[in-house]
Amino acid sequence: MKVIQVGIGNMGNTWLNAVLKSTEVEFAGFVEINDAIAEEQAGKYNLDRSLIFKTLEEAIAKVKADAVIDVTPPRFHSPVAITAMNAGLHVLTEKPFSDTMEAAQAIVRKAQETGLVQMVAQNRRYFPSVQTVRRILQSGEMGRVTAVTVEHYRHMTFSNNFRLHMQYPLIVDMAIHHFDMMRCILGCNPLTVYGRSWNPPWSRFDFDASASVLFEFENKAIVSYNGSWESQGGDTSYNGNWRFDCEKGVLWMRDNQVYRGYPEAWNKDMDAPQEPQDMDYLPYAHQAYLLHEFYEAVTTGKPPITTGADNLYSLGMVFDTIKSFETGSVVRCGVPEV
Ligand SMILES: NC(=O)c1ccc[n+]([C@@H]2O[C@H](COP(=O)([O-])OP(=O)(O)OC[C@H]3O[C@@H](n4cnc5c(N)ncnc54)[C@H](O)[C@@H]3O)[C@@H](O)[C@H]2O)c1
């Protein structure tokens, strides 16, 4: 399968590496609007400079490709996806799916009209720790999940980056991963959300970089999410630390490892250790998982999990959370009809 990668700077590096290592997918061309980045990346990855174009339209006219991987900032996701699908190309778009719900829905409508594969890169689902927790909870062996507590704290060291100037950077650019992970792990969607956001006085971000959010899910689990990108120490991993309070014990996902504790053990010894759990083996993880799934979807027709239509529910959590910040009210979650 041949792909055009749009946006080859910064996060583009991860996708350049994923495709260059793949035995299933190869590059037909690249699109990059910044000449300095195009030149730097051509040197670093030994890319054919004649295959780096300024616009997707030009790339489509000059090279033969099956699909597009879009690694541009969110406001370009809709024009890139629509241009690609109008030319008959499948699309894999980086998260967040789009900068507005309307733009995301327009992409989903175009995918439905054309029948092309259209996926969103929610790579954090495909960490072994996330799949392990998901498997244990979905097996039912822990009983009902009543509460989930998520902590994500980072001191982000951005300089001259779009995230410093965007609204609700923590929620739109990062929590979209955690919200999507909640749906993946619990296997259902949220019913309501209530949240507060704020910007610490020392923040380098123009808009709120900290938040506290409470979701109620369809299975009645209450999920409490606390995070900041202006933490002054004690960083968690990007995936964050998760605690699942269940009927038959407690499960933790911490630093991408999984631990379990049982009431039987604690009744005997209050200091009983949390038991490390064996991790699920994933033949592909992170971007390699998504790339393989994209390849399979295009070449065999097997539907991917993180389609745009599915991702509207994760993106909806982002916009419903912001609505709650701005109205001070509990917001009923839901996705408008496409
Ligand atoms: N999945 C993850 O873990 C993860 C991590 C980081 C970023 N991202 C996502 O990847 C996307 C890109 O983020 P980034 O940090 O690389 O942004 P960035 O602004 O640092 O880099 C974007 C690149 O795309 C180029 N570009 C911008 N508009 C373009 C256009 N219209 N056509 C061609 N090239 C264009 C820029 O010149 C730059 O090289 C965002 O949606 C971001 O949220 C995902």
Image (spheres, grey):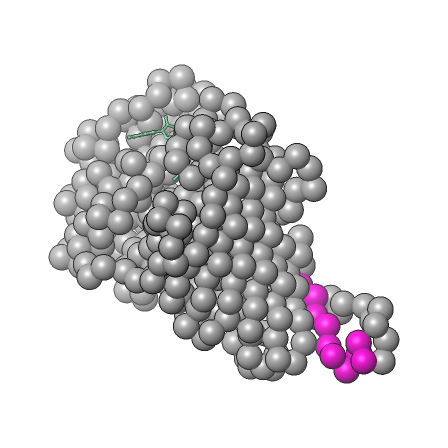
Instruction: Provide residue 138's location: percent of width, then percent of height.
Output: 52, 76
Taking the image as four quarters, which one is ligand 1 found in? top left
Instruction: Provide residue 154's location: percent of width, then percent of height.
Output: 60, 40
| Residue under the image location 52 percent in, 50 percent down | 212
> Looking at the rendering, which quadrant does residue 96 occupy?
top left
* Vertical side of 43 occupied by 136: above or below: below
| Residue under the image location 19 percent in, 49 percent down | 106
Q: What stretch is highlighted in magenta?
A: 258-267
Quadrant of the snapshot with the C terminus: bottom left
Instruction: Provide residue 322's location: percent of width, then percent of height.
Output: 38, 47
Would residue 275 be found to the left or right of residue 185 on screen? right
Question: Which of 320 and 94 lies nearest the eye of the viewer?
Answer: 320
Residue 259 covered by magenta stretch:
yes
- Confirm whether residue 206 shows in the render: yes
Instruction: Provide residue 38's location: percent of width, then percent of height.
Output: 38, 23
> Looking at the rendering, which quadrant does residue 168 occupy?
top left
Residue 333 covered by magenta stretch:
no
| Residue under the image location 81 percent in, 68 percent down | 273
Q: Residue furthest front?
A: 328
Would residue 4 be found to the left or right of residue 289 on screen? left
* Vertical side of 317 occupied by 34: above or below: above
* Vertical side of 47 occupied by 183: above or below: below
Would residue 143 be found to the left or right of residue 174 on screen? right
Question: Which of 323 and 327 lies nearest the eye of the viewer?
Answer: 327
- Confirm whether residue 89 shows in the render: no
Q: Residue furthest top?
A: 36
| Residue under the image location 73 percent in, 72 percent down | 261
* Vertical side of 221 occupied by 24: above or below: above
Give the number of marks.
Answer: 0
